[in-house]
Image (cartoon, rainbow, N blue to C red):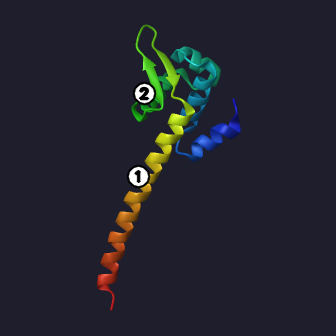
Amino acid sequence: MDSELIGKLQKLGFTENEAKTYVGLLSLNEATAREIHELTHVPRPKVYGVLDRMAKKGYVEIREGTPAYFRGVDPELLTERLRNEFLFSLNETLKELNSAGNGMRNRCC
């Protein structure tokens, strides 16, 4: 696995297991939880939780069945979602900082 790429994904908010899972899914295209575990060495009991969290965030697609198959979303779509989440969070933080700053200015002098 590309440890540099995994590190970059971690800087973007992925856990190590999420980063390994996403990179693994891109190389496998579509895979079962067992296949993901075998490639990434993410502990098998944790793979399902990681995949579930990532699916809720929109980073992984699930094809239901027995077994279920998983696919990482297109990297373009992933980076667009990450960008939007970051910008939303940044704007919300700015609003709160401005609000907090206004309260401080009203108390001064």
Q: Specify whether 27 is left or right of 64.
A: right
**Relative image position of residue 104 (x, y in whole percent):** 34, 79
**Relative image position of residue 16 (x, y in whole percent):** 58, 37
- Asked if residue 41 shows in the view, the reply is no
For the residue labelled by badge 2, is the local secondary structure a helix, a strand or a loop? helix
Q: Quadrant of residue 105?
A: bottom left
Q: Quadrant of residue 101?
A: bottom left
**Relative image position of residue 55 (x, y in whole percent):** 43, 29
Q: Quadrant of the C terminus?
A: bottom left
Amino acid at dot 1: Phe
Q: Looking at the image, which is closer to me, 1 or 58?
A: 58
Mark closer to the observer (2, 1): 1
Q: Specify whether 109 is left or right of 16.
A: left
The residue that disc 2 covers is 52
Q: Residues within 10 Å of mark 2 (few under 14, many from 20)?
A: some
Residue at 49% across / 22% down in the picture?
45
The correct choice, above or below, for 49 with respect to 79 in the image is above
The residue that disc 1 covers is 88
For the residue labelled by badge 1, is the local secondary structure a helix, a strand or a loop? helix
Q: Earlier in the sequence, mark 2 or mark 1?
A: 2
